[in-house]
């Protein structure tokens, strides 16, 4: 499978620690060098900006998706390959995953977590079937992974749901993880029991 376009969720905080900024830049560079288009929230701040800038500096194509109210606050990145303006945050999230080959999350705040959990929820329902990759810089996602394990222990999730996401330690491992992610087909009969 040729990976053409991915969606990336990550922090908008301008106070992100250097290792998170570095991971954002590294991911942007790797995707650009592999000619993989990036769809992200379109922001000009925080790790989001570093991802976009690193990709653009390396000849990549970066598409932002932003609601009008955030553009009005001048939070839109002015140098992107393409900016899609939407009406609200709901439309934004839907647009961001349209026709992408994978969803990638770097560490971030509530916005990142909300987007990631929506993608996982949609995958569980079969609305989205693409690989979901968590880049676990500084083991940031460990508490969330522990919570997923608790969900499994308490039968809120089935053990087979673990294959909805792949955890990697570094942006270097993202492309391999997308290529080797298990096929997800929750609408097949064998998945009907996973509730
Ligand atoms: P957070 O992780 O809370 O910083 O939120 C980042 C995610 O939420 C991004 O992937 C964006 O889609 C969205 N978001 C939150 N705040 C902003 C902002 N100031 N500018 C653009 N997008 C934002």
Image: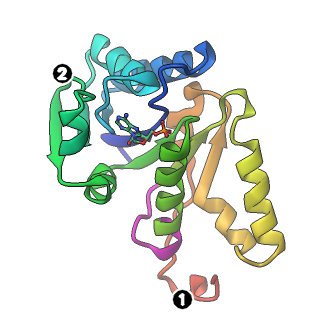
Figure quadrant of the C terminus = bottom right
Residue 186 belongs to the span the image colors magenta: no
Looking at the image, residue 102 lies above or below residue 35? below
Q: Is residue 183 visible?
A: yes
Specify the quarter for ligand 1. Answer: top left
In this orientation, which residue lies closer to the viewer: 62 or 49?
Answer: 49
Q: Secondary structure at mark 1?
A: helix
Q: Which residue is mark 2?
A: 78
The circle drawn on residue 40 is none
Q: Is residue 179 visible?
A: no
The residue pinned by badge 1 equals 189
| Left or right of 78 on screen, residue 38 | right
**What residue range appears in magenta?**
123-130
| Viewer-side label of 1, 2 | 2
Q: Is 67 placed left or right of 138 in the picture?
A: left
The colour scheme used here is rainbow
């Amino acid at each position: 499978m040729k990976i053409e376009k991915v969606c990336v969720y990550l922090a908008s905080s301008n106070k992100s620690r250097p290792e998170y900024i570095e991971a954002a830049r590294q991911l942007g560079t790797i995707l650009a060098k592999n000619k993989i288009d990036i769809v992200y929230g379109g922001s000009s701040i925080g790790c989001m900006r570093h991802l976009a800038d690193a990709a653009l500096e390396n000849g990549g194509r970066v598409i932002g998706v932003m609601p009008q109210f955030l553009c009005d606050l001048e939070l839109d990145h002015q140098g992107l390959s393409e900016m899609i303006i939407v009406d609200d945050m709901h439309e934004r999230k839907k647009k961001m995953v349209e026709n992408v080959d994978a969803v990638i999350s770097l560490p971030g705040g509530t916005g990142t977590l909300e987007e990631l959990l929506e993608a996982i929820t949609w995958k569980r329902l079969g609305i989205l079937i693409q690989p979901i990759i968590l880049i676990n810089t500084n083991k940031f996602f460990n508490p969330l992974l522990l919570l997923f394990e608790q969900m499994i222990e308490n039968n809120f999730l089935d053990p087979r749901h673990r294959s909805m996401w792949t955890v990697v330690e570094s942006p270097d491992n993202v492309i391999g993880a997308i290529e080797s992610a298990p096929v997800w087909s929750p609408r097949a009969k064998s998945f009907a029991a996973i509730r």
